[in-house]
Image: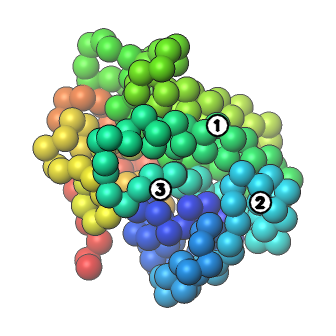
Amino acid sequence: MRIFLAGANGTIGRRLIPLLVAAGHVVTGTTRSAAKVEEIRGLGGEAVVVDAFDAAALRDVVLRARPEVVIHQLTDLPDVFDPARLREVLTSNSRLRIEGTANLVAAAQAAGARRLIAQSLAFAYADGPEPHAETDAIASAEGDTPSAITARGVRALEKAVLNAPGIDGIVLRYGRLYGPGTWNTPNARAPLHVDAAAHATLLAVTRGSPGVYNIAEDDGAVTVDKARRELGFDPAFRLAN
């Protein structure tokens, strides 16, 4: 299957490409930096340099890739977490979720992709009884708090993906990632190892009905029963290396 992976050299993308290739898929992956092209190629994918904010350029590269499935792993996060820059980082990342997602959805539709899989957050729910199910409300997007900034991006991303005409939209609400290239520890609330996140994404390429899935470990914050049942998700999955 031909797959277009937006954000191929991100934390999840680097773990996902080898899984996709091993499963027999042909992967075209994006990066904003020409310096990272060889990294994508080394993992087994074809690389294209494009900025998701450039709608015309993004459309062109997606059309050339002719994907059956588009995977959205776009983020705008620094390699090292700096609490002093939290608001700036969240604002930038939220903008990418809003504008970049809209551009990617339009490109996927133009290319005739049949499925669009996008990363979201399992820790953006509004306060309420736990564990949170996929039907629970996302936090309020009103105001300028970190939670509201994040919620605006999450809400826009999920709406764009789930309501795209002609495409089966799947939203994977990942827990707080830990493992190689991440900020968190396994002790974080709603934790998720990056390898398990990548594997869940691989599973969603061929499994699952359109909709939302919580992807996290069983610590009581969210329920992952739907992902286990429909995707075959296993939070204990780890890559061999």
How packed mark 2 is, by other alpha carbons closer than 10 Å (few <14, some 14-19, many 20 or more), is: many
Q: Secondary structure at mark 1?
A: helix
Q: x%, y% of residue 206?
A: 56, 57
Which residue bears the numbered disc 3?
201
Which residue bears the numbered disc 1?
98
Q: Amino acid at mark 3?
A: Thr
Q: Quadrant of the C terminus?
A: bottom left
Image height check: is 100 above or below 131?
below
Cα distance between the residues tagged 1 and 2:
15 Å
Residue 12 visible: yes
Going by the picture, which residue comes out furthest to the left? 187
Instruction: Give the camera-side residue of 190 and 206.
Output: 190
Choose mark 2 or mark 3, whichever is in front. 2
Residue 193 visible: no
Q: Amino acid at mark 2?
A: Leu
Q: Amino acid at mark 1?
A: Ile
Q: Residue 52 is drawn in which quadrant?
A: bottom right
Which mark is first along the chain, 3 or 2? 2
Q: x%, y% of residue 27?
A: 61, 74
Q: Secondary structure at mark 3?
A: helix
Image height check: is 140 above or below 238?
above
Instruction: Give the camera-side residue of 217 and 227.
Output: 217
- Name the residue rendered at 69%, 60% in the picture: 51
- Name the residue rendered at 32%, 57% in the picture: 80
- Name the residue rendered at 50%, 69% in the picture: 9
Which residue bears the numbered disc 2?
58
